[in-house]
Image (cartoon, rainbow, N blue to C red):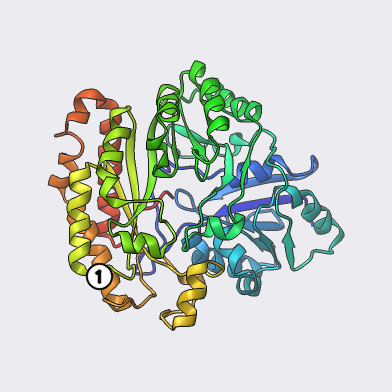
Amino acid sequence: MNKKILFIQPSIYDDKGKVVKKNKLYFVGLAYPVLASLLPKDWSCEICIETIEDIPYDTDADVIGIGGMGHAANRGKDIAIEFKKRGKIVFMGGPMVSLIPEVAKQYCDFVMIGDSEEIMAEVCEDLEKGTVKPFYKKPITKLSLPLPRYDLVLNKKIGDFLPVQAGRGCPNSCKFCSIYCIYRNKYIKRPIDEVVRDIEYVKSLGFKKFLLIDDNIVADEEYMLELCNRIKPLKMKWMSQCAIQIADNDKLLKAVAESGCYTLSFGLESICKPNLESFHKTWCDPQYYIDIIKKVNDAGIEVASEMIVGADFDTRESLLETVEFVKKADIIAPKFYCLTPIPGTDLHTEMKEKGKITDYDYMSYKPSVSVLDTPNMKAHEVTECYWMVYNKLYTIPAILRRTIFNKRFLKHPGRTVFYLMVNLVYRSQIKRKIAPNIL
């Protein structure tokens, strides 16, 4: 066995079963550049991002690692099967695989469950000895990482920013969330010196922007304030995601904006308060959503949103109201997901007990297909409403109203043109029945 790993980030299948391909990838994953940096010195690796390149099935690597976001698991399974036929040693990991390791193990030699940083060296040692275990699991005790191997992705067709890790986990307890399922209210922070080191390196590579990878940047105010103070002199622009509670903290919101943050993604989930209560998200109140978004916008930060279709109190009428809410709130990049009972989450336990799940093929779950019957709609009706919402929000006139023909264009023309392109890409995906995603 040679000491080389081919890491593969699978694409996804569209609703017709075709592999989704793109000309360019904007949101580059960080997992593989990090794992590559943790390999023993005598090991080498390559990274393949299937969305923008073909899988080298004739690779000389004897070991294949397959991961990716949850809805890429089904494609990852098929890639694993093909490499196994070719006699390769295959392992799988990632969020969905970590929640259903016994299912994933059917298609590969071993599964890495959860965070892999503290176990990568052991895996390589076992590979060398020929004594790999079926499952590897070692939750991280601290989040301290070497400089990621960005060099492994720089020659690919990527956008104008790179990812940098800050923290993992979230103090909130949303019922449907895999992050809560994995970390159970823990928030683990990287040393600020390390984060700044990575940002400075990204800048040295010629990038002027970065994506701050963090499940909730408002989880620790003191940490984020210090990080913002360190980022500000670097004069970099950045994006991230967090809870809407940032709008309640004027000091933090100001610091985030002044440090160069220009976009935050909020999980709004629903404009129906009973839905939010059922998600254990009682700290959100939809009656204040528009004011919150305006406050963040006024600070100079755009809001991208993520919302759910198929909650208990959803109806076709309430989802039409959601469309109007998005327009009124002037959200520049709205995204939606069918409520999905991911195994291991509290939602899955509850829905299974109630007999609401219509499909138990977990590996095939995707954000565009509902597998839950609700009190008001069958699963197939939820799926129909999902596409209805997207088609109404991503018409050409709707896109132009929130970009070029909008006051934000006068304030931030370059940024607005970028989001015009994002919207048009999303529209193209929607027309092809592909859920807009960050692949």
What is the quadrant of residue 19 in the picture? bottom left
- As drawn, 311 above or below 302: below
**Identity of the residue furthest to the bottom in this view:** 355
What residue is pinned by disc 1? Answer: 384
- As drawn, 234 above or below 397: above
Q: Secondary structure at mark 1?
A: helix
Residue located 25% across and 51% down the image: 427
Residue located 24% across and 26% down the image: 413
Residue located 29% across and 39% down the image: 293
**Identity of the residue furthest to the top in this view:** 233
**Identity of the residue furthest to the right in this view:** 129
- As drawn, 380 above or below 93: below
In the foreground, 107 or 314 = 314
In the foreground, 397 or 265 = 265
Q: Quadrant of the N terminus?
A: bottom right
Residue 196 at least partly seen:
yes
378 left or right of 127 in image: left
The location of residue 247, given as percent across then percent down, is: 37, 36
The location of residue 428, given as percent across then percent down, is: 26, 52
Residue 342 at least partly seen:
no
The location of residue 112, given as percent across then percent down, is: 68, 60
In the foreground, 113 or 347 = 347
329 left or right of 165 in image: left
In the foreground, 220 or 306 = 220
What is the quadrant of residue 378 in the picture? bottom left
The location of residue 327, given as percent across then percent down, is: 18, 47
Number of marks drawn: 1
Label 1 amino acid? Glu
What is the quadrant of residue 294 in the picture? top left
